Image (cartoon, grey):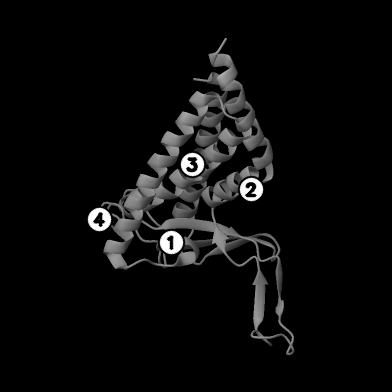
Amino acid sequence: MHFKQFKLAATLIFTVLLADQLFKFWVKTNMYLGQEFHIAGQWFIIHFVENEGMAFGLSFGGNYGKLALSLFRVAAVCGIGYYLYKLIKEGVHTMYVTSLSLIFAGAIGNIIDSIFYGVLFSSSEFQVATFLPAEGGYATWMHGRVVDMLYFPLIRGTFPDWFPLWANQSFEFFRPVFNLADSSITIGVCLFLIFQKQIFKSEQAKNTATPTQDFQ
């Protein structure tokens, strides 16, 4: 086990999870669905929404579909966690460990919502949710909704009348509302894409050196 890489991975995962869950807890216990606070005018808004199923608010086959999706997420995270452990044992490029740790932490952050939030919180519709309500939560285990709040509508406008397909229709960039866990996953993927040449070059060099060492 490469202790420095293990320490790096553990620190990143713990930091992302702590920040993500503290932010979500604050939103759930201080805001109702649809409420928003403008942090930087119209460009940066804390806007509370809940993700019913998959990304961008899409749902997946009702209650059974939601359960299947939650179980799939758990299995996927277990696989990523095991793969990350193997990479650290093998001493791969540090940026590989960093990117995968961020993806792993973000995935866990959203899974916590899906598994536990339905039981831990009351509904946020037209009211601020209560933590551990006496009457029970708004859903059962594995049927919670993911809390999203970061909204950056940087550009708003209307397509010109000559524009194909969307003529005179309004557009907005960036439209999706997301959370810190989503950001962690995105940053992890971007880091991997940016440094993939160095990562694979390091792996190739290590694999090339191994046979030589065997004959010594």
Residue for badge 3: 104
Marks 4, 2: nearer the viewer:
2
Q: Give, as a three-letter code, the residue at label 3.
A: Phe
Q: Residue 4 location in percent, x, y? A: 57, 21
| Camera-nearest label, 3 or 4 | 3
Mark with earlier residue (3, 4): 3
Q: Which secondary structure, mark 1?
A: loop
**Separation of disc 2 and disc 1 at Cα?**
21 Å
Q: Nearer the viewer, residue 110 or 42?
A: 110
- Place of residue 57 in the rendered image (x, y in percent of width and height, measured from the top left): 46, 66
Crowd around label 1: few <14 · some 14–19 · many ≥20 (10 Å) = some
Q: Mark 2 touching mark 1, by CB under 8 A?
A: no
Residue 189 visible, this orientation: yes
Secondary structure type for disc 4: loop
Position of 119 relative to 204 (above/below): below
Disc ID at residue 54: 1
Q: Residue at x 65, y 84 (%)?
A: 166
What residue appears at the point 53 percent right and 20 percent down from the top-left corner? 2
Q: Is residue 121 in view?
A: no
Helix, strand or loop under label 2: helix
Q: Which residue lies under the disc numbered 2?
A: 190
Residue extending furthest toward the front: 215
Residue at label 4?
Answer: 135
Q: CA distance from mark 3 to mark 2?
A: 14 Å
